[in-house]
Image: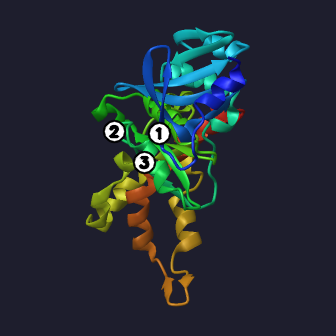
Amino acid sequence: MDLIEKVEKISHEANEYKTNFQIGTEDYSLYTKSFGKIGECYSAIVKHGKEKYLLAMTDSPDDLFESFSGKEYSDGNVKFKFVELSYKNVVSILKAERALSPVPIGVCNSFGFGDRLGIANPGHLQALKTSSFKPILAQQSIRELTRTERKPEDVMNAAVWSILQEGYKGSWGADADHLKTTADIDLMMNAGYTMYTFDPSDFVVNEADILKTDELEKLLEKINWEALETSFGNLLSNYADKEFKISDKFTIKPDAENILRASIKYGNALAHVKSLFNHIKENYSEKEWE
């Protein structure tokens, strides 16, 4: 039996979610939406008992097929490999099929799902079936990763396999959420995340809302004006007692005290955000987003 006949044997009706088939003496369920090609291999997500695999099929093994880790089986000139759903194999797949990689979503309708345990992404993709929204499938904060004892690679791993299982063909994003340090950025960047959300909350001075004016003035020297590339005097000159029209029904006119309180409350937070941005700009500006 050649490869085309084997492929036809396990083909499926488009309205089915799973179909059963047999290889050797073992019974498997095949996720019908997943059926397609990766590189030069025919492939599909299959389930045997409680375990899922990517079933790779070829009559001419290429470098991608050989790179996969998993149990191999032959039927005539057709080779099968039950590829483990591991991050190592995801890396191989993304090198062969760049279109499967997350991308910067840009300005469009999108939704961050945040699959905390790595088991809900298939359902998330099904929820988008009739929607134009782009999915942010891999969306985790460092805090969430710590609490769930997962790594950024685990989140990316679950997202990519769900895309293959559901046969999703659109673009998708990966959000590195609530990043507080440059080490956090490096961790997520190395795992392939394409959106970076900074969390400067540790530098926000909430008591600035209630401090007296003389107390606020004493804190001005603690603001990192150099990083902000401005001064309190410049802020007063640019904003004090000037009207800013937000909408037809809403105009603001900050006075000197408003600017003082805002400077103390958010000055160092903004400086920290700028430092995180500069870290990406200086270290990853040449990175190619797939």
User: Of circles 1 and 3, which is in front?
Assistant: 1
Amino acid residing under circle 2: Glu
Mark 3 vs 2, N-terminal side = 3
Give the CA distance from mark 1 to mark 3: 15 Å
Residue occupied by mark 2: 144
Q: Is residue 106 visible?
A: yes
Q: Residues within 10 Å of mark 2 (few under 14, many from 20)?
A: some
Question: Which quadrant would the C terminus be assigned to in this image?
Answer: top right
Label count reads: 3
Give the mark toward the camera: 1 or 2: 1
The N terminus appears in which quarter of the rendering?
Answer: top right
Q: Which residue is mark 3?
A: 123
Image coordinates of residue 83 in percent, x first then y, are 52, 19
Disc 3 residue type (three-letter): Gly
Marks 1/2: CA–CA distance: 33 Å
Report which residue position mark 1 lands on. 18
Pick whichever, 57 or 62, lies toward us.
Answer: 57
Q: Position of residue 284 (x, y in %)?
A: 65, 33
Secondary structure of the residue carrying tag 3 is helix
Measured in 3D between alpha carbons, the distance from the residue under mark 3 to the one under mark 2, in whole angstroms, is 21 Å
Q: Residue 20's x, y, as percent?
A: 46, 32
Q: Label 2's element?
A: helix
Q: Nearer the viewer, residue 78 or 64?
A: 78
Q: Where residue 101 sits: x, y (%)?
A: 62, 36
Looking at marks 1 and 2 on the same chain, the residue that comes earlier in the sequence is marked by 1
Amino acid carrying label 1: it is: Lys
